[in-house]
Amino acid sequence: MRKQDITIYDVAREAKVSMATVSRVVNGNTNVRKDTRDRVMKVINRLHYQPNAVAQGLASKRTTTVGLIVPDLTNLYFAELSKGIDDIALLYKYNIIITSIENRLMREDQAIQGLLNKQVDGMIYMSDSLPEEAVQAFKRSDTPVVLAGTKDNHQEFPTVAIDYKKADTEALNLLYNDGKQNLAMVLGDPETVVNAENRIPTYKKFMQEHNLGEGHIYSHIKDHSDGYNLYTQLAQDGIDGVVVTSDITAVGILNSAMDAGKKVPEDLEIITTSATQIASVVRPALTAIRQPLYDIGAVAMRMLTKLMNNEEITDMQIELPYELLKKQSTSNE
Amino acid sequence: MRKQDITIYDVAREAKVSMATVSRVVNGNTNVRKDTRDRVMKVINRLHYQPNAVAQGLASKRTTTVGLIVPDLTNLYFAELSKGIDDIALLYKYNIIITSIENRLMREDQAIQGLLNKQVDGMIYMSDSLPEEAVQAFKRSDTPVVLAGTKDNHQEFPTVAIDYKKADTEALNLLYNDGKQNLAMVLGDPETVVNAENRIPTYKKFMQEHNLGEGHIYSHIKDHSDGYNLYTQLAQDGIDGVVVTSDITAVGILNSAMDAGKKVPEDLEIITTSATQIASVVRPALTAIRQPLYDIGAVAMRMLTKLMNNEEITDMQIELPYELLKKQSTSNE
DNA sequence: ATGAAAGCGCTAACAC
DNA sequence: GTGTTAGCGCTTTCAT
């Protein structure tokens, strides 16, 4: 298997210089006379020399590779975040190793350890759940990490996200102002930081402040069919307005309501707090909090490049603005 | 930066064996006495030794890393393919470096070269367009490649896909049997192999064989808004049945038709030949050719593991079965 | 079954 | 500005 015929040594010999000089040319070191540089470049091109990134990584202790930890690539929420990351990574010439942790075979801390073994220069963590073992794994290493589109308990890690409390309050408020009184919240895992410390308290506080009673929180609703099946329950509980944390789930509720002969938004108003492309292509289109997912990913990656270069960072907790897109699943009177 | 404190050398010293023996233990080589193996393992655990994958890669010339080349992660078609790949990669303990080529800054051959520089053990290529430079880049290396969800001109590369001609014929036939006579085909780039050598000829042949005239092929329709805007034209041309190669595009056409007060399927039947989750959650749900995307990815990755191990492969061109899902965007009388 | 030693292809002092 | 020389942390003959 001829993976790499020509090495830096071959170039050095042909150009009649030392390996060090070739290395300097390859790495853009300015301490090379122009004519030697040209000579070396000519040989590099003639031989089609390409540096072996693995050898570079071993020698320099920098792999120009970052690790992404993501629950599920087929969830557009993460796909859109990843796209932002990817574009900035390309700009700064980093490669991306992606590790999906949805699979039961791969725990969060194992994913982290695997990336560390690969000597990634940094990591971006996108799961809404960050178990203690994962926190410890991050802390043991001194490889920088940035959280994107999620938050951790103690704001220990650099983070890029939106203000979830504010966004959820705004969502609830929209339904309330439309005259809905029986408001519910639908979410996935209730124990994630974003849910347990942001969304749920926000919901409870809102209900209390507006004298709307205890309210209803429906947990563990994660995909289209979960949402679809949930509708019966919502109807039974007399819900007339619902905030849903995932748009595909919201679509499930929407479809189920429509199939039951109900009208949206007249009978039920729906707003999702994580809009992806899906929210805007269904009919009626979903009113939504549109998180700037691409930007969150991009800013997180940019932040990571700084951390990897030991640059000064003033703000470790970045909150990006979101939009409230009023569409057809709320009346917006 | 303490990326990796303890090396194989530390373990060797503590366990009073040579590096070679530690290496054998780490790699599961059987030529180690049980008691020495146990002794070494104990030290490994005590010191929390983790092998440096970069050093392993340099020494062994195997990185247990595969490269993925994909146009766009936020396209569920590729996301679902990737998921299949990812699961099998995990099973065989390969890491995945993902390279997105949608960005204008990254050409196909550059992406390939970048992965080669990283010394990936294999690559999976998922773009529907495979330029000549990319073909050459693949051929220059002897790193194995598998095409997933696409085909190349001369069947030169190992491939996993479906029978596009058969699938498209079936789709057209469905519309025809529903009594539609003015059939059109909507696709993206008309010059990709799948389109130029499979879909377009299939369409033309079908139209001719059924005496349906020249027909209409609409190209360069790639996203929801392209589809949405196209509808006016379809209406003008009197199209009553359309085969669309991308489901998000099909949804655009669907929404536009509905907004124009038309009925689907009565006024216009729509069938997509690449169903993702989106096709099934819109209303009316789209009749579709469901390609087994997850399986295509999984089989492609499995095939790649064999190629990377120089195992015998009997069939380099694999075609997986697809399903025809009859939903609400066709009448199916 | 185990160890010694030579690399893998490159970077980074350090010397000149 | 350029060359010499150690490594980086591991695998892999080749001995024993």
Image (spheres, coloured by chain):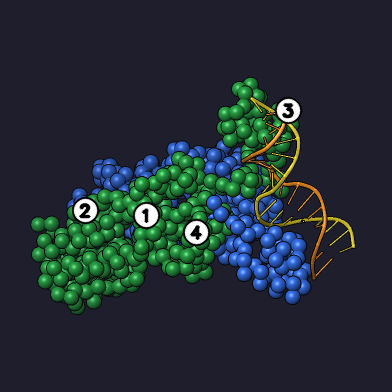
Chain colours: A blue, B green, C yellow, D orange
Q: Alpha-carbon distance for marks 3 and 2?
A: 64 Å
Q: Which residue is mark 3?
A: B16
Residue for badge 1: B159
> On the image, which quarter does residue D2 sit in?
bottom right
| Image-based side of B165 in relation to B155, left or right | left
| SS under mark 2 | strand
Determine if marks 4 and 3 fall on one subunit: yes
Q: Secondary structure at mark 3?
A: loop
Identify the residue position indicated by label 4 in the image.
B99
- Residue B295, x across and y down, in percent: 34, 47
What's the distance in space between the residues labelled 2 and 1, CA to CA? 22 Å
Q: Kindly identify which chain the residue marked by label 4 belongs to.
A: B
What residue is at 65 percent from the left and 58 percent from the top? A7
Residue at the location (55% across, 60% down)? B114
Q: Are marks 4 and 3 in contact (CB under 8 Å)?
A: no
Q: CA distance from mark 4 to mark 3?
A: 44 Å
x, y (%) of residue B283? 23, 58
Distance (Cα) linking label 4 and label 2: 32 Å
Q: Is residue A221 above or below residue A90?
A: above
Q: Nearer the viewer, mark 4 or mark 3?
A: 3
Q: In the rendered structure, which disc, 4 or 3, sits on the residue that comes first in sequence?
A: 3
Q: Secondary structure at mark 4?
A: strand
How packed is label 1: few (under 14 Cα within 10 Å), some, or many (20 or more)?
Answer: many
